[in-house]
Image (tube, rainbow, N blue to C red):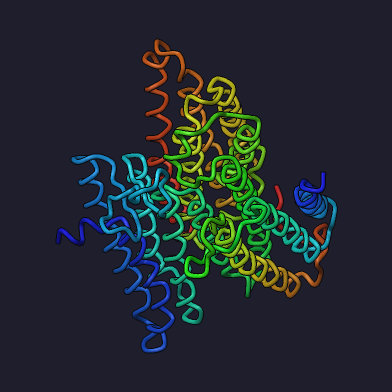
Amino acid sequence: MSILLNNSPILILALPLLAAFLIPLISRINKKTVGIFAVFVLLISLVLTILLAVKIISVGPQVYVFGAKSSSLTLPTGLKIPIRIMFQIDAMGIFMGLITAMVSFLGAVYSLAFIRKTEGMDKYYSLLLLLTVGMFGMEFTGDLFNLFVFLEIASIASVALIAYRGTDFGEPAEAGFKYMIVSTISALFVLFAIGIFYGEYDLLNIAALANMIKYSQLDKIALALLLSVFAMKSGAVPMHMWTPDAYSEAPAPITMILVAASQASLYALFRIIFSLYNVHMNTLAVGWIIIIFGVLSMFIGVTMAIVQKDIKRLMAYHAVSQTGYMLLGVGVGLAVLSNPIALKDYGITAFEGGIFHIMNHAMYKGLLFLTAGALF
Amino acid sequence: MIDNLPYIAVALFVGLGVYTLMYKKNLIKIAIGVCLIENGVNLFLITLGYRKGAIAPIYTMAPSGQSMVLPTPQALTLTSIVIGIATTALILSVAMMIYKHYGTLDTDEVRRLRG
């Protein structure tokens, strides 16, 4: 039991990953058990996430280092910088992890009744598990390059799932193409920013980078790239064109998981801002940029939702506006980060509100999309 | 100047890729634009890993006292190339599906989703 608990950060990811590649084999034996198997694996993952959350609340942030003698050995002997890949999970990370585990478990349960077509079912469940792995990875990782890899895993799996009905209809393929281009470009620019960090500091670990970061001209370019890219992936307004198409054309349970996936991108944005740059950057300016993103998303998202005739497009535009509320809350907190009085007055409350709304949104919007799936 | 040549090539690659994405109307050409950006980023990573006069990091064959290259950028580039193949294949297969249903690859005509 203690071994299970000590290795839970990796098991949460490794079990769905292994199951994703086992599923095509299982479907050779019996096509009907595939869905049950995926639900079972995601249930184990959910239980492990809850156990890890209890541990993190009672003990504190957890570090899991791959390939070291002990999983908490961050620095190899004789070296000054961490070179191993590691997971760093704090309260915020496990908060997102809980949302991911819950949403993907519910999505898989709903899929049992929703996906009636038997051919291609193994691929559907494999991709669903891979999408879950990508999201977990983005939330747990302590390494910038791993963030890129998991971002790509999540986006490739989600594109294939959005275009899942593309064999029968044209529109899902069109939405899938849009999302594919958006996510590939964003992942490549994330890689470019990682290259800038590596060239400057020879480091990829977020915590080690945060100690070294100087906010030079190159860092500003990297910040601009990362900020715009993750805002685009989370569907904030100037770059929201993919959101209504992708949300409305994906199968209903996938839309529910996609909502959580865009929250994972939002989490990556917060991680870059707070863990990596923090007080080294001009918090007032960056905070205001995020506030402007947020306010634009709130107004334009809701205004566009009013004129929609399709229920899933309406909900998708509403989802865009809800992302705005999170950005606004966190942006206000960030703008007053260097002002202790204002931070105590309303900054912390704004943070809490923005972050708490991530959970609200993932739950109620996901369930709304499921009702839309039940309608037609 | 000559040392900066790879960086200029990176800028050219990425610039051409972004131009292709913005101004070309054919889905296959858009896929080519994505490939161009990807090549530019890969070249950028490889260029960062270059050290003048350093040797490959193989311990058993290393002459003593000579500096070695850190293999991280190469590992990053390899991963990125593999991911790039997957994304390109996916883009092309989705473009194929679009062609089957719409009978065209022109982005002006592949526009049933709007508003």
**Of residues A279 and A306, the one drawn nearer to the viewer in this rendering:** A279
Q: Residue at x 43, y 71 (%)?
A: A125
Q: Is residue A115 left or right of residue A188?
A: left
Residue lying furthest left:
A1
Left-right relation of B115 to A149: right
In the drawing, does residue A222 fall left or right of residue A322?
right
Residue at horizontal 45%, vertical 75%? A116
Report x, y in % for residue A347: 42, 20
The residue positioned 49% from the left and 22% from the top of the image is A332
* The residue positioned farthest toward the top in the image shown: A341
Along the viewing direction, whichever of A214 and A268 lies nearer the viewer: A214
Residue A213 at x, y percent in the picture: 52, 33
Give how far across and how far down residue B34 sits, in percent. 72, 58
Residue A254 screen position, x and y as percent: 48, 60
In this rendered view, identify the residue nearer to me: A230 or A5: A5
**x 43%, y 31%: residue:** A354
